[in-house]
Structures are given as structure tokens and as C-alpha cells.
Amino acid sequence: MREFGYQRAHDVSGAVALLGADPDARFLGGGTNLVDLMKTGVERPARLVDVRELPLGRIESTDDGGLRIGATVTNSDLAAHPEVRRRYPALTQAVLAGASGQLRNMATVGGNLLQRTRCGYFADVTKPCNKRVPGSGCPAIEGEHHNHAILGASGHCVATHPSDMGVALAAFDAVVSYETADGSGELPFAEFYLPVGDTPHLETALPPGALITGVTLPPAPVAARSRYRKVRERASYAFAIGSIAAALDVRDGVVREVRLAFGAVASRPWRARTAELALTGAPADAETFAAAADAELAAAEPLPHNGYKVTLMRNLVVAELTRLAEEAAR
Amino acid sequence: MTTATTGTKAVKGAVGTAHTRLEGRDKVTGAARYAAEIPFAELAHGWLVLSTVARGRVRSLDTAPVLGMPGVLSVLHHENAPRLDTDYVGMLGAPDPTAAVFQHDRVPHLGWPVALVVAETSEQAREAAEALLVHYEEEPHDVAFSAGRPDAYEAAGFGPAVTEKGDLEAELAASAVVVDEEYTTPEEHHNSMEPHAATALWDGGRLEVVDSNQGTTWVASELANMFSLDPGSVRVRSEHVGGGFGSKGLRAHQVAAVMAATVLQRPVRVVMTRRQTFSLAGYRSPTAQRIRLGADAGGRLRALDHDSLNLTSTVHEFVEGSAGVARTMYDADAHRTATRLVRLDVPTPTFMRAPGEAPGSFALESALDELAEKCGIDPIELRARNKPERGPVSGLPFSSHHLLDCFREGARRFGWADRDPRPGLRRDGRWLLGTGTAAAHFGAGAAPSTAAVTAEADGTFTVRISAADIGTGARTALTLVAADALEVTPDRVRVRIGDSDFGPAFIAGGSMGTRSWAWAVTAAATELRERLALNTGIPPEGITIRSDTTAAIGALAQKERHSFGAQFAEVAVDPTTGEVRVRRMLGIFAAGRIVNPLTARSQFLGGMIWGISMALHEEAVRDRASGGLYGADLAGYHVAAHADIPAIEADWVGEPDPDDPVGIKGIGEIGIVGAAAAIANAVWHATGVRHRNLPIRPDRVLLGGTAEAGTGAPRA
């Protein structure tokens, strides 16, 4: 194995200083993705700065009724938190739909946002991949892609973002906080992930050397009635082939407010704003739901073997919004 | 001394009662050591370097910089490795040249071993192996497997290439009902929990190999042949084996370890990584099968054609004998079976649990279900009407044939009588429900083995046989068999296995291990008991009786000898997402005397669970551009997770087989046979749509849609 340096940080500024914006250094959270990638040679950091002991492990209510989630909160603790379960149930469901109990005990919120695609070409250093080696090509477009992106991809990369948690965060307008040597900053979730374009290796808008310190969920009463549903090729312990986070507020048969986000269809958790626009103020019925899904998916550009995802996502939108509408009617 | 082998007599005792594994506590506490965990002084570590091109030649290797890396002792490759002899016929035929590493510069597939880097530590070896620059002369490759390949040829393997009787086309033309469909199964891999690992060393002029394999005398004789050694100078041990499933014979790691130990004259260990096992450990070939069935209105078969294509490498022929299923299961006035091969730039496939029968039964038992639907006959009744009186191809009588007993008992317990045969009618919320069934069989063979049983002076007994316990519970089963033959309690019997010095014995494979070994153990133990009955006293060194079943097996009457079974499955299908969940499953088997009900049930269940996995999940995707696999790890290659496994039950019907001298038949493979077909048939019953391509993935179900009962017309 390749040797690498390991340092443990005890406070945020110390962690940022230890990393020193060194491109060959990485922050280490739960290690559930980074360590795997180091074993396969996809990641070859010279140094790791362990941030697990930073004082970022709390979930607190904000003054305006939202939640602030520390970057080192584990997936397990996030899913189990009573306020998360009460105010943002889809977030709990999303986190619990991912990985296994052991992995959720280790994985952190910050690391979850920065996890890499599970594209099999990306994970195999003997194969080309524009995300891993810019300019080397994307074999998925002509090759295996039945679980690749249908939205927002480019001719340079069709990989999907694997996170379940991120799909719920996208739906609930999360804001990512970070710290650099120059001070702290924030990124709205919609701006956190960069478009694929011709730079699929550049994944987030974080400045170099930035440490994610937390995620803030603004107050969202609609989120109290939300669901996450994940479809995968086995019943557990698999990444989604399509997933959806949905929240719905229906009054008198009319959609007052709706949140929709898709997973496993794009390089980032995909906020379905076109569908939301079509739904808001429209009758809460299956016909509207289907039309809204079609409006969102009109932008889909499926490859020869992943066109089923268009049907799958349409069906998921109709099924989950119908269920939420029925629950609201009770 | 070799005894004349006699048949067993029925004894009441340990056999047939549940016993936990003798080594179970050692395994769960970590006290049991597996091949890669056994310490050796002066141990060096080898790391295999695999080709990154799918076809071509190794032009050069930049070994100099690697040899200068910390701890590196040697780099073996085709220019400096010891020469091997591959011109011999071993226990299971000519060797697969895949194991004969570093003999030439040709690269016949991606993942072909091109070098072994040996270092003081495993980490140093790995780092150096990953740093080794190999230059290739790359040639265009072809890994595209499909039914229509013009270069496919008929090939024999584990049976003839083609069997034919009657006028197939005429009988098809004259049939009231015809099914003519193609079925495919994908490339599948048997990644055991314990990766392949071997340590080789020379000790006093003998080659010692500590390994994880399915037969120590098998591997020892292959190594002796390859390295041109006297068979007596090779000893292979394999105490605990964390799964084999057909993949643990002679492989690149043992040969590379022996080479390095020979060159360096110190112990060398080579362990495969998980990713390496995907190209070095063998796998099940994809199959493309065409089934043609013609029947009269009553469902009696007039014509049966089972044609199966599989792939193999360019360096070795391996036939996945899927068409062999039809040679046992169903007769017809016109009957044809054929196995065909296409040679591609891929690793050689190998035995994987129920080779032939697992994919073959998916095709044939799915087609039977389609025939039942077309004839309007219950699928079980259809099978009853087509039960063969003699082997359809061999013409030999069956030693026993209890398939219909399995169906009767299974149908009773599964509630089959209440089933409405029409598809697409049952709903539970978003789920469509359906049930399906399929038949199963696997051959009950035996192969010559030797055993030694010693009456110790302290009143205990020691059995020595080079059997392999690959997780099946063989060690425990043989203890029970020996105890009954000796007419003592099992606690007085100690069984030692996994050591080629115990003499020739068959492998843990072909569902023949326990049957073959129990025969030899029983023969020796029976004679020993008779000797002890003379009350001659036991000398300090004990009294040892040896057996050899070669003559007895040679004298066995030629018959069709098989285990049979009936698989039942209930599935739920969400047509809006394509998700398929198995809700319950039942397998009833007629598999001879069950030695240890506890471990036997586990083995049946394990096979059925693998059948669920085969039906719904498993699929290795070959990337045409590179020629390698896409996602060659256990994150990319999906097997069933716990959450996929429902209420699942396996049981057996009593099977008196007075014609069989041991009564024990194999149970290692039959659990998976027919399981995928039962699930596929249930998916049809749920949705009205046939799925003839495995695995039945969500995208396939979603795009396949549903059909109105009876119309077969897609509604999606």
C-alpha cells in the first residue's frame, strides 16, 4: 500500500490549517467512501486530516425554527434525531434508506455530501474516466450505463450522485456552511454542486481547502408531511436506480406548496423545480402529478439503456404525491 | 492393506439426527485459522499483477525500478519463471492454462496474470505490484457474447455435444401446442467469503502447500504434474475453507506461490484480492438457450429441443452443460439436446454451483410453465404427465425417481391446490402477487476414494480422509457416518480431513463429496468393527484399516441416479417501479439419506437463496470496450441481501433407494436448480408477462409491463 500521513484535528481552524489547502491532502470523516477509494487507488492522498473529533457533532434548532446539523453528525444520529423525524421526516427516511447500520454509524453529514459517484468506470483505475482523469474519456456513454444519469449530464460524464440524504437536503433548501483560512462561508444547496459541463472532475463550489462545518435546514412547515422513496435492484444495501423526496401541502384539493427532488438521475441531487412550478396552485390529482412529472422529465436525455428511469421517475412522482395527498385528506 | 468394500447396512444412530458443526465454535470465535492466517517463519508475500489489456502480448516489464523498492525480493514473469508442464490429463481433465502462469508473453484476456511481485510484507508487495509498468502490444479483442454468433461450434463436455432421436421438425409440425423461445442467463460469479489464498514452502525435499481448496489430493496431483514432481513429494493441506462453489481448484495463486517458493527457497504466500477473483477464480458463462417444445393437447411431449450456447476462453474449453437438463428430466418422441461454444477473449469459465443445471433448468422449467399455460394444464400435472420411465437419452432405468412425491408434498404445504392459474389477478396494495413452481434434479454420482480408520488404544477412533469441508459440514457428516459404521457414539470418533497425505479421495464437488467419502469411510469402518469383534486387543499404535472404493464403484450397476426436487415461490411485483420481492419459498427434495438434517437444511436453503439471487440480482457486466468487467467488486456485483430473503423453507421426502449401496445422494447443488425458474414463473403469474432473460431487473419488469389475463398482450 502507499504510505500516507495522518493527522487528527481538534478544532475547526486547526483542521483548516493542517490541510493548508494542500491538493494532496483530504479531510477524513467516517472514511466509508474515502478509505475504499484509497484502497482501489482512485484517491491517492499524501495526507489525511481526521476531522471526526471536531466539535461539530450537534443538531440544534435555529432561532427561526430550522435546524443546524453539524458536519460530523453521523448518519445514524441524524436519522434518529427527534426534531429531524418530526420536522423533516423525508430526511430520516432518506438516511435510513442508505448503506447499512454499521456504515451509518460511521458516515458523517459532511462526508455524505462529498462522497463520489459509484460509477463502475470511476471506481476502476484501469479504465478511462473524465471524472478521475480529466480528458481520458467516458466509457459509460457507449458502454454500461443502465444506472447512469438522464438529467443534467454531458458528453463528458453521465455519472450520478449516490447520496440519499442529499436528495432530501435538496428538497428542503439546505444551506452548506464551510470554513477556510480566509473565514467562513455558505453555499445554498442549489449552488453547492457544479454543473457537469466539460469539467466533471470539479464537483462542488467549495473553495480550495474548505472544511464543511454544517448544514442548515431553513424552517419548512411543508416538510413535516414528506416522504422519501428509494427504488434499487435489491431490497437493501444498494444505491438507488431512482429515488424521490417529496413534501406536499394540500388545501381544499389544491396544491399550496410542494417540494420534489430526485436521486440517481443526475450528477447531483436533482431539485425538480419545473415540476414544483407546474404543481403549485393546481388540483392535487394524479393527472396533475403526471403532467408535472412529464414537465420535469421533458429535459431528460436518456442513453440507450437507461430510458426506463424516465418512466420510473414519473411513476414515483405520481405514486408518492398521491400518497401524500391521501394522507393530507385524512 | 486394502479392504474389499461392502455395502452399508441400515443402522440407527447418529446419521439422520441434527448435529451442530464440530468446528462451529472455532469458526465463530476466530480460533479456526484459514489459509491466509496461518503463520510461517520467514514468510514472503507475493502479489499478482494482472493484464490491463484483453488481448495481445507483453512487450516488456520495467522490473528494475520495482526491484529497488523497499522489501521487494523478486519479480517473476514469463521471461524468468520456472517452466511448467501442462501436457497431462488430471482428475477433471486437461488443465486450464490459466493456472499455468508466466509461461509465454501472450495475453488472452483482461486480468491475465503477467507477473508476481514478492516482498517481505504484503503491503510492500502490493505497492510494488501496482508500480510495475508493463508494456503491451495490444490487439483487437472480442468479448461480445450473443445467441447469433456465427463462430459457435458444437462441443462436448460433461456429456456429449449433441444427442438426437426421432424427427424433431416433423413432431413439432404435428404438435397441437408449440413453445419456441429463447432464454438467456448472464455471466455469474461465485465469490466465496474467503478469497483464494495459498502458502508454499519446501521442507526437507517436499513441497508443502497450505491452501483453501475443494480437494487436497486434486490440487497436489495438479501441482506435481505441472512442476514435474514425484506425487509423493507434494503435500497440500486445506483445513478450513470459507466457501468454494466450484472455484477452488488449481488456480494461478498456488502455482505462483510454488514458483516463488522454489526460486527464493523460503515460504511464499499469495492471496487474491476480491477484484482479482473476478478474473482469476472462474465464473459461470452466460448462456443463450433456445427451447422448442411440441405437445399434444393433453400436454404430452412429442418434441423437445434444448440448445444451449455458452462462451469459453481462447485457451481452454469449458462447457456449461445447460442442455443436459433435458437429458434427464423429460422424454419426447423426438428429442434433441445440444451444447455449443463460442471462444472469446475472456477468462475461462468453470464449475459454479449446479453447473449446467442452474441455467439449464431456468430455460427448460420456464418453457414447461409456458407449455402448461398454453395447454391449460396445471404445471405440476404437466410434469406428472411427462415423467420419463427411463433416461430419455441413456435409456437406462432410474435407480429411484421421487420427483412427483416432492411436488405432492410441496403442493400440499404451499397451498398450490387453491391457486387460480390466470395471471395478473392478485393484488396487495401496490404489489401484484403470483406463485410459480419448477422441478429440480442433480446427478447422484460417486467417485473412487480412499479412507483410513484407526481404532486407538484409548478406545477412540480416528478417521483420515482427504475430504474437504468447504462450509458444508462435511467433517461433521463424516463423523456421524463413521460412528454409525463403527456402532459407537460420535464423541469417540475424530475425523481428520483436508490433507493430501491421507491418500486419494474425490473433491468436494459435483454433489459427490459426501457420497464418495462416506462410502470409503463406511467400508473401512465396517471392516474395522468386524476385526474388533474378534477381541484381539488393540496394540499401542492402534489398528488401522484402509479402504479403496474404486472396485465397488466400478461394479455399480449402470443406472440413472439423481436427486430430485420441487421448488415453489410466491413473488410480489410493483409494476410502477419494476421491483420484485420474493415473499415465500419452499423447496422439497428427494435426495437420499440425509446425514445431518441441520446442515443439510442450511445447504438446501443456501442453494435456494442463491436461486433468488440468480433470478433477481446477479449479473456480471462485461465492458466491450476494455474487455473487462464493469464494477468487479461486491458493491457492483449484487447478490441477494438479507432483506431480499423471505420466509423460506426446505424439507425432504423420505427416499428409500434399495438399489443404492450408500443411500446418500448429493445435496450440494440441487437447492439452486429450478429456483430461478420458479421465481420467473411466479413473476409471470403476477404480471402476465414472461421474463426470459435473467436477472429479472426492475428496468426489465418496468418496461415489460403487465398483460391482461389470458391475452398475453402487454398493457404497459
Image (spheres, coloured by chain):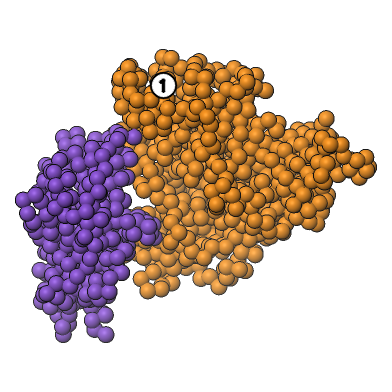
Q: Residue at x 54, y 48 (%)?
A: B30
Query: Could you tell me which quadrant the C terminus of chain B lies in?
Result: bottom left
Placement of the N terminus of chain B among the 4 image quadrants:
top right
Instruction: Choose between A104 and B119: the one closer to the eye.
Output: B119
Q: The residue under label 1 is which amino acid type?
A: Leu
Task: Give the residue drawn at x 11%, y 46%.
Answer: A208
Q: Residue furthest left?
A: A182
Relative vertical location of residue B85 with respect to residue B602 in this rendering, above or below: above
- State the residue in front, B193 or A159: B193
Give coordinates of residue B229: x percent, y percent: 61, 18
Res. B556 image quadrant: top right
- Please tell me which residue lies in front, B328 or B637: B637
Q: Position of residue A98 (x, y in %)?
A: 32, 59
Q: Is A4 or A298 nearer to us in this picture?
A: A4
Residue B196 visible from this viewpoint: yes
Quadrant of res A299: bottom left
* Residue indicated by mark 1: B73
Give the residue drawn at x 94%, y 42%.
B534
Chain coloured purple here: A
Judging from the image, what secondary structure is the residue with disc 1 in?
A: strand
Q: Position of residue A162 (x, y in %)?
A: 26, 53
Q: Which chain is orange?
A: B
Q: Is residue A112 visible?
A: no
Left-right relation of B671 to A138: right
Question: How many callouts does the rendering have?
Answer: 1
